[in-house]
Amino acid sequence: MCIAQSEVSDCDDSYQRSVEFPGAWQKWRPSDPTSPHWYSVSALASLVDAEIAHGRTNGTGGKLLRDFVREFMGLTGTAKAKQVCTVLPHARRVGDLDGDVGALLTAMQAASRPPKPPVLGAIGKEHLQSCVDRWYGIRQSWYAREAVLDGGIPIIVEAFVAETDAPGGLTTAVNFSPTFGDPLANSLLDADKVSGFGAAGLLRACSVETGPARPGNPTYTAVLHIICPSLTFLDRGKSRLDPSPTLVAAATTAIWKTAKTAWSDAERRRKDVAKAARHREAAYRSRAASEWTVKNAAFAVMEQAWSQATDGGAWPASARTVFYQARPLMQRLTDKPINDVYFTQNLLPEYERRMGKLAGVYYEPRGTLYEPHTGRTVPLGTQQVEDYHLPSWTYDKILYIEKQGLWPVLEQARLGERYDMAIIAGAGFASVAARTLLAEVAPDCTIFVVHDADPAGYNIALTLREETARMPDHRVDVIDIGLTLGEAEALGLETETFTRASNLPARLLPHLGEIERRLWKADQPASRFSAICERVELNALTTPQLVAHITQALDRHGATAKVVPDAAVISAEAASCIQAQVSRRLDELLRDLVDVDTIAATIGAEITAGAKPLTPEAVRAAIEPARPINWRTSTGDWAASAVEQADDVITDALQIAIRQAMAA
């Protein structure tokens, strides 16, 4: 867009745009004088070195210092040049500076004023408006120009946003040249009302859709142009900038000025939609609240609650997060109490079975899988189970125990290691995630369950192996090792009473023995007076009794066989162990032969002394704004780069030390 008679390809390769360089443009050119305020000491030193080298090449002895000074903006006058040169009376030519570049730069900056931003020039509103209108058809447009000084360095940021007949995308340019990507993509632009990473992110946050728009929303074309004589790039293609805070602030202001109308329009549309929704809800509320069941209300608002919780599927959200979005919406439709467990464990899963999986919704971990031998623990949530893979040749049995609080007992008894068995410490009934995991590993593992001697405990064992309304296709072979009421009676454990407020599950009745039917009043339906029953929990067992009960049951079912792979796997593991042992032994021998730590300390000190110092400013620039790394990561990257450059020095030092040690 900024090169004379150039052709710039649109995202549609079927046609190209021809852009003319308007004669009205005024801009700073590379042949124009530069300002000393645009230089650092190192940058000016590089220019001085180039002048000295040029003088040696052409045999002139180098340029006179006063002529060199007069080449800079604001110092072209004889008096100004003389004023600067008096600071360095010994330097007649540039080659005589002899390390006084810093003093020269200070004198040049003191004798001149920082040029104001307009010296850089700009594309201007008229030209941008003309091009965009010719290409895409403008309905309305906004232009903003921010001109600032950043410690003597001028910056101009131009932003242009137009509502167009066809989407024209986002065009970005730096110093009158288009870039291949958003130059501010790594920077957080935090405006008055919204924020986003890069120009594209801030525009999206302002509802400036530069691509195909959703029905009913306008389409836009946007341009961002940054002009600055001193920029730091993050890539070789010069598409990503490492901008100063001043530049980021200027770009943020310019974009916000051009996009705030679009943001306001979008906010108005959102409010209109919300207002219409409130009218619809008011119509719903006008009906008798009793007409709405909790289930019907949940299904009516589920999609809206999901959209609010996940931002339309852009973010993950737990089932409880969806519940908290759904509850106020449901309460507008029904005055019946809404329970979070009923919603997350019944209503939401049923909705997903009927209407399809809601993107990004996951169920929080309930229970933990403990691997034997590795020490690895896996929280049993939806996301964790999806990412879990059965480790090879580690365990071939799984024990599910319904009480998380008993895991320390099993851990100290080392049941997992003794039986090559993973242990799942649950929280009552197994979650969908836990049962999904068991179904996946069932072909390779024998599964056991231990539970309380009460209806819930027996039902836990049943749901582990049989289908439920929530998992209609679930079926897994599970060995139930108690605790049963008969086993509790044989151990002399005392029963405790509990109130059964509902009927026993019909599918549980065929699995009950005589003692269960008697103590749980299986033939007596629960009335409004309820049924007084008896049970025995696992906690009634002493620690030795619990361990003995589980180990005896495992032994009885032949779970004592250890995991042993075939010969090929064992051979490969043995070879790997030998290699590791040899590697450790070689490391020990090398450290006995030479003082590795002293060599490392000496070379490390030399590398540190020779490397460019790492300053807090450099670290801050590398990690801000809001990058997912901390200062130690940045420091480690700097150190790794310095060591990599000194690889030959390290190798030579080690070889010399080894030869000296061998010769001694």
Image (spheres, grey):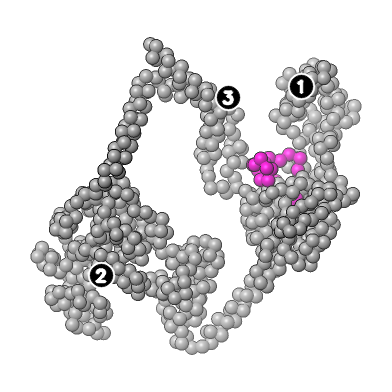
Say which residue label 3 marks.
Answer: 610
- Look at the image and tell me whether residue 148 can be seen: no
The mark nearer the N terminus, 1 or 2, is: 1
- At label 3, the amino acid type is Gly
Outermost residue, front side: 568
The mark nearer the N terminus, 3 or 2, is: 2
Say which residue label 1 marks.
Answer: 53
Residue 393 vertical placement versus 80 (above, below) = below
Position of 633 compared to 230: left or right? left
Alpha carbon of mark 1 to alpha carbon of mark 2: how far? 87 Å
The mark nearer the N terminus, 3 or 1, is: 1
- The stretch of residues the image draws in magenta is 224-246
Of helix, strand and loop, which mostly describes the magenta segment? loop
Tell me where residue 123 appears, x and y as whole percent: 82, 51
Tell me the quarter of the picture where residue 171 sits. Answer: bottom right
Residue appearing at x 72%, y 63% in the figure: 167
Whether the residues at callouts 1 and 2 have beta carbons within 8 Å, the answer is: no
